Amino acid sequence: MSKSRSHANSVHDLFGRVIHINLDTGSMDQIHIDPSVYRRFLGGRGLNQYLLAKYLLRASPPEDSEIPVLISPGLLVGTSAPGAVRINVDSVNRFSGGIGSANAGGDFARAMKSTGIGTLVLTGQSDTPCYIELHAGQARVCDGRGVWGLRVGDATDTLQATYGHQCQVMCIGPAGESGVRSGCIIVDRSRAAAKCGIGTTLGEKRVKAIVAVPGGPSNWAHEPAEFTRLSGQLWNKAMTSPTASIMSQHGTLCGINTKNPFGAAPYRHYQDGYMDPDRIVQINERAFKQLEGRRFGPEGCPYKCRATYRVESGTYAGSQVDVIEANTIQDFGIKLDIVDPAAIVHAQMLCNEYGMDIDTVAETIAWLCECFEKNLITLEDTDGWIPEFANPGSLARWIERIATRKGLGATLGEGSYRAASVLGSETQTLVSAMKQQDLYEAVQIPRGYGLGAALATRGGGHCSGSPFTESYPGLVDERVGEAVYGVPTAGLPSVYTGKGKLVAFHERLHSINNALGICGFVTIWQRCDLLDLRDLAGLVARATGWDMDEEELAAAGERIHTMERWVNAQYADLGRADDYPPNRFFSSRVQRGPYAGVGLERMAFDEMLEENYRDHEWDSDGRPTRRSLEQCDLGEFSQ
């Protein structure tokens, strides 16, 4: 056997088998992926989105049941690389019709890689409820009637009783089974692959869960000694950053402290960008310490940033979750003006158990509360129930009604964009959605953070291109901004100049992180002293044997992002008009706090859009051109 052939086999060992299951027939086959495809798209999100784009080219528009769901850990998952614990789930977006992409941490990604299966592609629709077992390089469709209808915790318990507690489970809840548009996939009981309604797409396919039964050896690396040496250096880099201490103590909860001072807190559904300090202190990271149990994290996570939270007394006694994120506090606390940590834990638990994206659920309920507060809807519209800010009981009631599709809950389960078309045109003025998907964050300021959320290919959200640099203005000065991010103004939250380019840099970085399976919190997304593109390229080169440098890795990030943008333009007709935030962000101002009076200027936002499009070499409508596709080695999509 030639050396090149042996290396090709080894690369396939690193990535794992690509298994396609046709749920219509129950048949399965292995898809051969040329090593050059792996080099172009890496793995995880990159490989999933490539296979999705190729599928759409062949079958457009696809039948609903034929829409594929693709599940893939990143390239480096299973190795000793710090933070290599993430898995990507991709499909068509149930909100926008464009690309759907969701990413989750936890233990499932490494467990799936250890089975020898690197990517699972599901098409068709099962006649009866089922789940998929992954073990020893094989996939099996199993009878799922015994777990169908169960909440996430009970379904996970049942499957682990069958396969042992060493198995890892990702599954949907009753919301995904019944067609709630924001149905998501819950990994390890508490980690959500949340966006785009992909859990509901699995529900349509009648797939309740994926069970990974680990047992394989550690993944192969082309240069094992060199990989181990570099990985050790990068673990040290991650652990000696101030981020390690903060994340190990508080996880992402401390993130709310960076938003409120800038006027970026979506208080009472964006009616202000600032919450009174005497209220926010009741739900900050220290307030949640009273409910915190053990801290833990998946193997491969440097920070162990997860913790259990349990309510021991009061109305919500017995409520428990394995993680509370900054999103949780912003969604159920700041956005709904609720300052009871126990009520917030309960709301998170309900969404986990029913399998719903907390960002969409909270945004829809907050929109409903504002509509009611402003007399745009009445008790007749709300089934006699009052939707009300600062009312934990109201929040829990509406979560339950959405999850079970009772009364108005069935309409709200479609998200606020679609619900507004039912409740009346006046309510549409208060909708906060991007590309028809409910928005999590305020986008007025910081400028780059807001632009990144607005441009996200999957529709809203800061995990596709929003920088954190503006949260550290003293740390990221002009010198650091230029040296690390290529933008001197990277650390200036109120400045528009350079932010289109800054977001383009982070769009490439996020694409790379998700393709490699690396947690963004160990990279320069989180802080400028963490893993950069040179570090990540070094890991890829030593894992694969490719002569890959940071320039080629950045090109892969650009390729993945441009391909997603092409799919959105081609199949959902999404362009510049879909990159603008809702009008309320242009017409309103931050009311209180250090940034009182600050708003978002449309002309300046236009200039940021233009700068971003130019950096990607797209046209003025934000659509990839034939030339930009060919420059990204995407010629197969340029015809």
Image: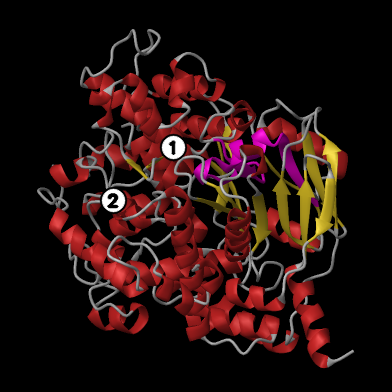
Confirm whether the magenta stretch covers residue 174.
no
Q: CA distance from mark 2 to mark 1?
A: 22 Å
Residue 485 vertical position relative to residue 2 in the rendered view, above or below? above
Residue 306 vertical position relative to residue 478 in the rendered view, above or below? above
Q: Nearer the viewer, mark 2 or mark 1?
A: 2
Residue kind at label 2, given as amino acid type: Ala
Q: Nearer the viewer, residue 435 or 293?
A: 435
Callout 1: helix, strand or loop? helix
Choose the circle earlier in sequence order: 2 or 1. Answer: 1
Which span is picked out in magenta?
183-212
Horizontal side of residue 424 vs 103, given as left or right: left
Q: From where the camera sits, is residue 518 visible? A: no
Quarter of the image that includes the N terminus: bottom right
Q: Position of residue 490 (x, y in %)?
A: 27, 72
Q: Position of residue 460 (x, y in %)?
A: 39, 49
Q: Residue at x 38, y 11 (%)?
A: 385
Q: Are marks 2 and 1 in contact (CB under 8 Å)?
A: no
Residue with the most extreme right position:
1
Q: Nearer the viewer, residue 26 or 179?
A: 26
Q: From where the camera sits, is residue 629 visible? A: yes
Instruction: Give the number of the disc on residue 203.
Output: none
Residue with the most extreme left position:
597
Label 1 environment density (alpha carbons within 10 Å; few <14, some 14–19, many ≥20):
many
Residue with the most extreme front position:
639
Horizontal side of residue 243 vs 48, given as left or right: left
Q: How many marks?
A: 2
According to the image, label 2 marks what residue? Answer: 577
- Residue 529: quarter of image: bottom left
Q: Position of residue 190 (x, y in %)?
A: 60, 43
Residue 524 vertical position relative to residue 210 in the rendered view, above or below? below
According to the image, label 1 marks what residue? Answer: 360
